[in-house]
Amino acid sequence: MTSTHRGPAADTPAPGQLPVADRRQVRRAAVHLIRQDTGAFITMIAFNALAAAAGLAGPWLLGRIINTVKDGGGVDAVDRLALGILAGALAQLLLARHARYLAHRFGERTLARIREQFVDRALALPASVVERAGAGDLTARGTTDVATAGQMLRDTGPDVFVAAVQALFILCAVFLLDPLLGACGVLGLTGIWFATRWYLRRARSAYLDQGTAHSALAEVLAATASGARTVEALRLRERRVADSEAEIERCVTAHDRTLFLRSVLFPSIDVSYAVPVVAVLLLGGVLHEQGSVSLGTVVAAALYLQQLSRPLDTILQQVEQLQSSGASFARVEGLAVAPKGPSDLSGPTAESKTGPIPSAEGAAGNDRIEVQGVRFAYGRGADVLRGVTLSVQPGERLAIVGPSGAGKSTLSRLLAGIDSPVDGTVTVGGVPIADLPPDRLRRQVVLVTQEHHVFLGTVRDNLLIAAETATDAELRAALTAVGADWSEGLPDGLDTELGPGGHRLHGAQAQQLALARVVLADPHTLILDEATALLDPTTARHTERALAAVLRGRTVIAIAHRLQTAHDADRVAVMQDGLVTELGPHEELVEADGAYAALWHSWHGEQPGPS
């Protein structure tokens, strides 16, 4: 998958991965988040600045104490200055505590916005984009990366900001004491600047690679866990273990790279801390002997620079976390520039192939599905579909049959807008299906496969996903329509909790729950690809007929692995080797004594009649 750029170019992702936002996009997103809570942000800055200012009182008052003692001042004067140091420390403690409280509130609210925005963007992604990127990548971004970005907003960001304000105030204080000592202290910090610059030039790419390695590992582990039975049945255990170990090694290599960067940065910083303090003491001693500065000024300047090590240490130690958090935030924001449809992934756009795309509203009055000269291949492989042409009238029930590998499921993905054809068009009402906005596409066409999901929550929660305003009577009617009689015997009815710790549904029940969601969604076109495969033949036929009755007037396209489904359809399309070779009503195709007739007779264990 190649990145489709919208606005500033995102960092180029590897093939098959979701994009990563570039620096300008990250800055723009951060500014947008701050603007959503400007009042809290400004208040947090104000309290941090006050806390930093309060912290400057100690060294200055200590210098005053030294000068007072040297000049022969009394105990009362020293006590008053000491009380001033205590008051400054107490004020700094209270102000810093309240500033941290404000920072945490700001961070948690902003993190909530990031999570909600991420969920909205993830749900808006076309299924094909998620499939190519892998569930592991999306999962890693939605968990580890979002949590890391949240830590930056809640802890790292405020800590660095407070430390930066403190460092700025301390340097200003040294310059106010004596400009020459201030210049000496700043020059002594140049070693820190060079070490940090070296680190920052390398850290972003290193942490992005580390995030990519985590995503790849999550994908391998998730695929292995979900397909554990298949792995065991096909004796793929050693291969999957080898794949996992390879991805773990990749993660270790990525971590070693970031560790090397830190191992160079931190020792360089530790050595650099002592340089400005020593330089100020040496220069201050010379100036004091010449009578240019007082002893208290030299001591105060040295203490300020010694005190400077604490905020600088915070900043530089958190630089590593900021780089990690920044890379995570860039990966989270990458969903904003992710492809919005299959036609964005590669190849010519729908406009270049078929002319300007009609308005989506154009499909409202004419819902006929047209497949014209469609060719499709996965990646650089051979064509799976080799020029398929098919027309499906509104309200028609079409069954698609054929041997395994004929291209039936691939055609269903194109009809559902999950993939876009390499050549040819798939339209509904003249509009390319793959170019419909995701929300409209999901109202227009629903693809149901034998892969289903039971969400944590109650039966009601699982059904309301498809129709938020549905009443309990409508929910029960949908369950009844798909033959889910077992729902009536649940201990708490629609309020029965499902999943671990609750009521567990077996495969057939979970499939019926998924089909009940389809009834509630009431799509214009329903595509069933082995959607009843887990049901016994009698229940499957009953369910399919019930669906056809409930969705009367809607278009139903069924990938028929049981030919009884084809018998009940208005028309049957026979696919062989990526082509539609026969098309017509069941009776006509049986009488024609072609490929479909052979399949029908074989299904019933009959010998075909003489040609």
Image (spheres, grey):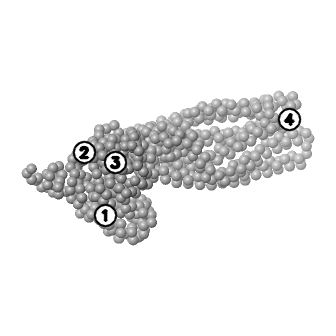
Q: In which quarter of the image is the N terminus?
A: top left
Q: Which of marks 2 and 1 is nearer the N terminus?
A: 1
Give the residue type that dot 4 points to.
Ser
Asked if the residues shown at circle 4 and circle 3 are in contact, with their CB atoms under 8 angstroms apart, the answer is no
- The secondary structure type at the circle numbered 3 is strand
Q: Position of residue 100 (x, y in %)?
A: 66, 51
Residue receiving disc 3: 426
For mark 2, what is the residue? 579
Give me the residue at 40% from left, 55% from top. 442
Q: Mark 1 — residue?
A: 552
Amino acid tagged 3: Val
Picture coordinates of residue 610, whole percent (x, y): 8, 51
Q: What element carries label 4?
A: loop
Q: Is residue 539 left or right of residue 263?
A: left
Can residue 383 be seen here? The reply is yes
Q: Which residue is drawn at 59% across and 54% down?
A: 109
Mark nearer the N terminus (4 vs 2): 4
Marks 4/2 in contact by CB < 8 Å: the verdict is no
Read off the residue under disc 4: 294
Q: Earlier in the sequence, mark 4 or mark 1?
A: 4
Q: Distance between the residues labelled 2 and 1?
A: 29 Å
Label 2 vs 3, first from the N-terminus? 3
Say which residue appears at 61% left-offset and 52% top-offset.
Answer: 36
Depicted 482 relative to depicted 22: above or below: below
Q: Is residue 589 left or right of residue 395?
A: left
x then y, percent, for residue 587: 17, 57
Q: Residue at x 47, y 44 (%)?
A: 338
Q: State the CA–CA distance, disc 4 to disc 3.
A: 86 Å
> Which amino acid is tagged 1?
Arg
Residue type, numbered disc 2: Leu
Which is closer to the viewer, label 4 or label 3?
Answer: 3
